[in-house]
Image: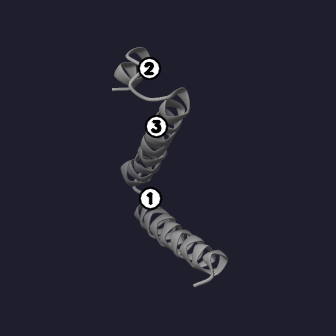
Amino acid sequence: MSYVFTFQHIVSRKINLVFKTGFCGGFTTFSTFSLESFNLLRKGQYFYAGLYVMLSVSLCIAGVAAGYMAGLKFKGE
């Protein structure tokens, strides 16, 4: 898909960079999370796998909530 955006000049270079960075960055981050979880399970470390998944998801949601609240505060709501 990025090939189309790059070589056919459908979007600007800045938008192209944001698309590639955001898409690839998000995909590789999730892939790493999944691989680490899978490796812990494969090694029989069920407690640490569960802890890793629970903490990762919980802290991610907390981070999103904190960012949202900060955005509302800066916006003045």
| Badge nearest the viewer, 1 or 3 | 3
Q: Quadrant of residue 49?
A: bottom left
Foreground residue among 39 and 55:
55
Give the residue pinned by disc 2: 6
Q: CA distance from mark 1 to mark 3?
A: 36 Å
Task: Give the residue at x 64% y 80%.
Answer: 73
Q: CA distance from mark 2 to mark 1?
A: 44 Å
User: Tag on residue 45?
Assistant: 1
Indicate the amino acid at tag 1: Gln
Is 54 located above or below residue 7 in the figure? below
Q: Is the C terminus in the top left, top right, bottom left or bottom right quadrant? A: bottom right
2 and 3 marks in contact (CB < 8 Å): no
The crowding category of the residue bearing disc 2, from other C-alpha atoms within 10 Å (few below 14, some 14 to 19, many at least 20), is: some
Reading the chain from its start, which is encountered first: label 2 or label 3?
A: 2
Judged from the image, the secondary structure of the residue bearing numbered disc 1 is: loop
Q: Residue furthest right?
A: 74
Q: Position of residue 59 (x, y in %)?
A: 54, 70
User: Tag on residue 19?
Assistant: 3
Task: Give the residue at x 58% y 78%.
Answer: 72
Reading the chain from its start, which is encountered first: label 2 or label 1?
A: 2
Task: Give the residue at x 48% y 30%.
Answer: 16
